[in-house]
Amino acid sequence: MHPRLDMTKASPDAFKAVVALENYVQGSGLERRFIHLIKLRASQINGCAYCVDMHVKESRHDGLSEQWINLMCVWRESPVYDARERALLGWVDAVTNLAQTGAPDDAYETLAAHFSAEDIAKITVAIGTINVWNRIAVSFRSQHPIDKVAKAA
């Protein structure tokens, strides 16, 4: 797979607009673990290797456990996530898969039991923002760095 386009060169203003959204999310006051959860889970759903690689590394850097990171793709089957994280994961899944889910009432109501209206607005903007980044990275075939090739012993 080869990169198709460097958005920073093709349309610097478009890139700056997405960065402005990202800056809002980073300064929104949402807990870091929630931002990591949103970014990693949406990137998994969207099949964005570039973003999954980045957000796994950022999650590790911020001290989130390997188990918390590794089981996110099967969060419904794992008790490692608390009630707030599970509500948030359900909303990330619903909003990221919007065409299939329609953002159902039960996912919203579960989220609303744990977060304020203001937080829900910020969370939903954060989900939308990572979905924009995922669509850019996947569409333009952005390549994640290769750290070290693993070899089985």
Image (cartoon, rainbow, N blue to C red):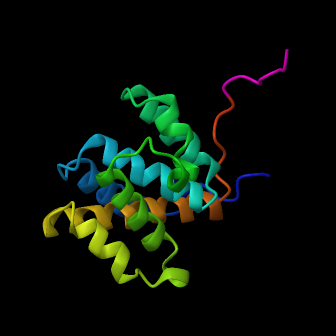
Instruction: Give residue 125's position: percent from left, percent from top.
Output: 30, 66
> Which quadrant holds residue 118?
bottom left
Q: Is residue 135 left or right of residue 83?
A: right
Question: In terms of secondary structure, what is the magenta stretch mainly?
Answer: loop
Instruction: Give residue 45's position: percent from left, percent from top.
Output: 58, 61
Q: Residue at x 38, y 26 (%)?
A: 63
Is 126 one of the magenta-colored residues? Answer: no
Q: Residue at x 29, y 41 (%)?
A: 32
Residue 61 to residue 112: above or below: above
Instruction: Give residue 20's position: percent from left, percent from top.
Output: 29, 58
Q: Nearer the viewer, residue 146 or 94?
A: 94
Q: Is residue 37 left or right of residue 101?
A: left
Whether residue 13 is visible, yes or no, is no
Instruction: Give residue 65's position: percent from left, percent from top.
Output: 45, 29
Q: Residue at x 85, y 14 (%)?
A: 153
Q: Is residue 6 left or right of residue 94?
A: right
| Residues in magenta, as a range | 147-153
Q: Nearer the viewer, residue 12 or 76?
A: 76
